[in-house]
Image: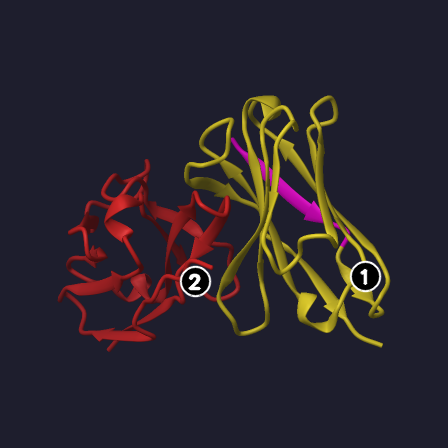
């Protein structure tokens, strides 16, 4: 089955930049979406279609896709950005959804 | 405003069945595909199942295939997940999530708050 790998944790000081990678076989051929999940809450979509922001998501959140990995970047990190972040793709071979292993972002 | 409210969770014994529901409001339910996603305690997100807008196409994760059935009633704006022969590793919060499109292979742009299923004897 298809797998997506993320770093378990990222620590960043307020005002700095956090980058979260998402890797998988041939990920360059897939469209990547990103979700934020704060403790005790449901996930929220923060980046769709590799790099687009849904309505209401701050411009500080951006996505990119190099072909070898997808990256979620959070600029000017705030305390309220502390959460778990998951990348997600569709495995068209097996017709199944796949979430990344998740990354916990800690704001120092 | 999109509203998704799950119900039906609880404690169930191994081998029994459970029916989860998701009530939708605030949009045209029949225009969109829907998903179930679950999260075991302290673990990450796991995609479970997808149903197309008209219910004609359904897909399942390997971990639940053969034990789970997704369905929908577009006249009642309701999504259902039937879990059969439940196992302890089915213990999780189950979220329903709305897809951006009707076929289902887009992003999940709205999520419910989830319902907790605990499988225990």
Q: How many marks?
A: 2
- Chain letter for the residue marked with disc 2 in the picture: A
B4 with respect to B15 (left or right)? left
Q: CA distance from mark 1 to mark 2?
A: 32 Å
> Which image quarter: residue A4?
bottom left
Which residue corresponds to the image point at 64% horizontal and 34% vertical from the top-left?
B24
Query: Which residue is at the front of the view, B100 or A22?
Result: A22
Query: Which residue is at the front of the view, A74 or B92?
Result: B92
Query: Was residue A71 drawn as part of the magenta stretch in this picture?
Result: no
Which residue corresponds to the image point at 20% horizontal and 49% vertical from the top-left?
A62
> Which image quarter: residue B63?
bottom right
Quarter of the picture containing the C terminus of chain B is bottom right
Q: Is residue A60 visible?
A: no
Which residue corresponds to the image point at 32% horizontal and 41% vertical from the top-left?
A48
Chain B appears in which tint?
yellow
Tell me if residue B40 comes above or below residue A34 in the rendering: below
- Marker disc for residue B85: 1
User: How dense is the environment of label 1, judged by Cα within 10 Å: few (below 14), some, or many (20 and up)?
Assistant: some
Q: Is residue A5 visible?
A: yes
- Marker disc for residue A38: 2
Tell me if residue A104 comes above or below residue B50 in the rendering: below
- Chain letter for the residue marked with disc 1 in the picture: B
Tell me if residue B53 comes above or below residue A28 in the rendering: above
* Residue B9 locus on image (x, y percent): 75, 57
* Residue B31 locus on image (x, y percent): 55, 22
Residue lying farthest to the front in this orientation: A93
Question: What kind of element bears circle 2?
Answer: loop
Q: Which residues are magenta?
A: B1-8
């Amino acid at each position: 089955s298809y797998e997506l790998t993320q770093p378990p944790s990222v620590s960043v000081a307020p005002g700095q930049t956090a980058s979260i990678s998402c890797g998988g076989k041939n990920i360059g051929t897939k469209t990547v979406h990103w979700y934020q999940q704060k403790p005790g809450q449901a996930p929220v979509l923060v980046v769709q279609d590799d790099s687009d922001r849904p309505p209401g998501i701050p411009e500080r959140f951006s996505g990119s896709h190099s072909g070898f990995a997808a990256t979620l970047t959070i600029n000017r990190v705030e305390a309220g950005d502390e959460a778990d972040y998951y990348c997600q793709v569709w495995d068209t071979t097996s017709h199944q959804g796949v979430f990344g292993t998740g990354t916990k972002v800690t704001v120092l | 405003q999109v509203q998704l409210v799950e119900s039906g969770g609880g404690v169930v014994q191994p081998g029994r069945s459970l029916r989860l529901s998701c009530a939708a409001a605030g949009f045209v339910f029949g225009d969109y595909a829907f998903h179930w996603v679950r999260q075991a305690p302290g673990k990450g997100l796991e995609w479970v199942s997808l149903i197309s807008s008209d219910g004609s196409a359904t897909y399942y994760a390997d971990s639940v295939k053969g034990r789970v059935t997704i369905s929908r009633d577009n006249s009642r704006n309701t999504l259902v997940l039937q879990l059969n022969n439940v196992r302890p590793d089915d213990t999780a919060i189950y979220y329903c999530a709305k897809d951006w499109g009707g076929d289902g292979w887009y992003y999940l742009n709205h999520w419910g708050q989830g319902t907790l299923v605990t499988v225990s004897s």
